[in-house]
Each structure stands twice: as C-alpha cells, then as structure tokens.
Image (cartoon, rainbow, N blue to C red):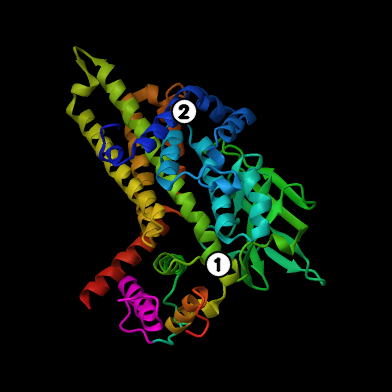
Amino acid sequence: MDKSRGQQLLTDAQKGRHEEFKSFVRLDVEPFAEQWDREQRLPESVIATLAKRGYLGCSLPREYDGQGWDTVTFGLLNEALGRGSSALTDVVTVQSMVSMVLLKWGTTEQKRKWLPPLAKGEMIGAFALTEPDAGSALQSLTTEFTPNSKGDCLLLNGHKKWISCAQFAEVFLVFGKLDQRPAACLVPRDTPGLHVEPISDLMGFRAAGLAQLHFQDVEVPSANLVGKPGFALSHVAPVGLHYGRISTACSALGLLRGCFEESIAYAGTRKIGDKTLGDMGMIRSLIARMGTDLEAGSLLCHNACRAEDGHLPEAFEKTLMAKYFTSRAAVRAASDAVQIRGASGCHASSPVSRYYRDAKIMEIIECTTQIHEDILGNIFVDQAGRFGK
Amino acid sequence: MTTTDEKGIRETVKRFILSSISIAKLDDDDNLFESGIVNSLFAVQLMTFIEKTFAIEVGTDDLDIENFKSLNAMTAFVLQKNGHANG
C-alpha cells in the first residue's frame, strides 16, 4: 500500500496523519473489532477515544472546534478505520454527514449551538432519512412535520428504519414532508414522543448501533429546521450523502486493504506439501485482482477527495465512482479472502469472515450499487449525447 | 473574458449546463426545474459551480427556486450576491 500511486500523491503531512491513523487502528481497533461485532455494540470508551483524538470533527473548521483537516486526510482516516472495523468507521461516516449538512445549510445560530459539541464528539448525530417503505425512493417519505397554530413549533409523526448509530446518537437529522414539501429538522434524542428501537442481528455492521425511530406527536421548535422546506431532498440530503459516500468509499478501500494484507500474509506462509499457497497460480490470480483493485480504488478515492478539496462540481460524480468501485471491489476481495483461507476464513478468529459480512453492507448504504449505476450511467450517456452533438 | 458582468456570468453558467447535460438548446428564461432538466445531483453540482466560479457562498437564505430557475435568474442572483443589485 505504501508504494501505491495513491500514497505517492500525498503530502508529507497527509502521510504522517495516515501513519498515525493506521497505528491507532492497529493498537486500539483491530484487537477488539471481533468482540464488538460479536457483542453487537461499540463500547463508549472507543467512541470517546475517537472524540479525544479529534476524529469525530476532523472536517469541521477550527472556529467550530473541529480539526479543519482537508478531505484527503478525512479519506485517509476512513481508510485506516475501515481496515479495522466497518462499524466503528460508520460512527465517523454518520457524524460527518450530519455535521457537514449543518455546516453548509445551518443558520448562524444552529451552527453555534450544534457544531461545537458535534466536533468535539460530546454529541453523536444520526442521519434519519430511510423509512420502511422509502429507501432508494426518497420521494416516498411519509414522515410528516405539521406546524402548530403559532408557527413556532412542529409536530413530528412518522417512522424511520435502518438508521446507523441511532442506538447511541443524541441528535437526529430527520427528513420528512412539511406541507408536502421535503424538509429536514434536528430532533434531540430526549424529546418526548420519540422511541428508539434497536435493530439487532444484522449480517454486517453489527456494532454500528442501527435502530428504528418512532415519532409520535414529537414537538420540535421550528428553529430546528435545516435548510428551507422544499430543498431537503434536492440540496440538504445530497450534501450529507456526498460525505457519507466519501467516507464509505474510503472505508471500503480500507476493508479491501485488509483482505489483501491478510491474503498475502496467509498465502506466503500456508504450506501445501512442499509449496506455499502463494506458489499456486489460481491463488495468485485472486491476489492479483485484489492488489489491482486496491491500487485503482486508492486512486479513485484520492481523486474524489482532491476534487472535494478543490470545491469542484465534479467531486459529486467522482465520489459516486469511487464508492461504486470500492464497495464492489471490497465484496469481491472479501469473498476471495475467505476462499484463500478456506475453513479458517469462515471462523470469527479470522477478520476476513467479518470483512465478508461487512463488505456487502457497503454496497447498500449511501445508495445502492444499482442507484449508483443509474446515476453514473445517466451521466455517461449524457456525455455521449453531448459529444454526438 | 470577465465573468463578473451580466453577459459573462450568463454565458459561463450556460456553458457549464450545456457541458453537463445533453440538451439541444437553452434559452435565457427556460425554467430548468419545470422542464425536469435538473435532478438533485445536478442541482448541487450547479450550486457548487456557481460558488466556485463566482467566489460566492450559497447559504440557507438563498435556497429559493427563484434564484436558480433559469439562466437569467442565476445571473441576477450572482450579481446580487456580488453587490450589483441592478446588474
């Protein structure tokens, strides 16, 4: 990995941070990731450590108590964490989704109130978009905000499902409809009428604290609306989903690196008669694909992060491409990593069994592979139309 | 060419839209949203392009369809953000 083209494009400061992230993951994440997965929960102490290290507010400006790191560094953090635990990375993913939406669309008062505790990790946020009957079809949201007669409060009713980190989040960015227009609103966890129902026994991301949210006549101040009603799905959610995809793309890249490193280590030492596994052509084929995907994914992620740092409009499609590629490559690599290890890869004592379950989730969160294909296909067909004009 | 006068702003935005979306032509008052030209991905790309190109920041108070519905609307919006209320 260190000799890859993606690494060569980094500044010394970015390389230094990446080494720091990888060291943290090696010592404080990897040894415990299997236990968190088995227990289906992250200990408070590890989230507190993320907070203490500034990882939960790393993309926010210093004026809001963030670290002010560039997106390339944010990507490297997610890559390093993704090698250790997809569930733990999901905390960084979701925190960045809520934080960056607030940074972009929050009022001055909202930024002052919410961003510092989010940046310092004193408060964990969750992005409450998906509903039981509205996943990819976001226009079908049925959660409803109803203004009271004075107009200073909203009454919230509805149901959200598959919400990452909802088991321990203190504030939710909830999407719904207000007078038939898409709207987004911050809802503190302790608001009466909000019931959080944990979801357990997921295939992957088992420690990511997913939950359902039930809102029954939940009263929230109108001042908690983020962005204007009518723009929640066209402008507010896309900012969050964009950061979610950057994070997930890089996290999938980290998982892919894990598969690669575990596989080459095993192939180099596992004896088959007087040869090693790595001497066998069919195993080399699997590892060749993994290593090449790793290099390609690294460059796609770096391109996407660089474009975001340049505040370029193409950052959105570059991020879609990165997430599309690395999540699919991670699924392939995890499957091959299990195959290379054989029976021992099917047991919890090897991280590749967890990688196998977690990788599939990467293809689903922050829009499915199929939605990515639809959007990217549309972009490429449009480009062909332009060239044909 | 300067992109800070009315004509320059309009042409710059028009070039970006035509380079991003496969449409035959775009008139200055064509409504981008009613015509279905703009999806949510392109809405944020267009906003980012305007922010980057004209060194302005689109904030929550600017979230008004009247600011983005057409080339003329976006031109007026950029001029107003840059302190040229009447162009």
- Mark 1 residue crowding within 10 angstroms, few (<14) / some (14–19) / many (20+): few
Q: Position of residue A336 (x, y in %)?
A: 32, 34
| Chain on which label 2 sits | A
- In this rendering, is residue A46 above or below A70? above
Badge 2 or badge 1: first in the primary sequence: 2
Inspect this view and state whether residue A130 appears: no
* Horizontal side of residue A47 vs A147, given as left or right: left
Label of residue A25 in the image: 2
The type of residue carrying mark 1 is Gln
The chain carrying label 1 is A
What is the residue that sits farthest to the top in this orientation?
A274
Q: Which residues are magenta?
A: B1-27
Quote the CA–CA distance across marks 2 and 1.
39 Å
Residue beneath the point at 52% across and 55% down = A240
x, y percentage for residue A165? Answer: 60, 42
Which percent across, then down, holds residue A332? 33, 40
Q: Residue at x 58, y 59 (%)?
A: A133
Question: Magenta includes B22?
Answer: yes
- Judged from the image, the secondary structure of the residue bearing numbered disc 2 is helix
For residue A197, say whether it is visible. yes
- Circles 2, 1 touching at the beta carbon (< 8 Å): no
Residue under pointer 1: A139
Q: Quadrant of residue A207?
A: top right
Q: Nearer the viewer, mark 2 or mark 1?
A: 2
Residue A9: image location, x then y, percent: 29, 42
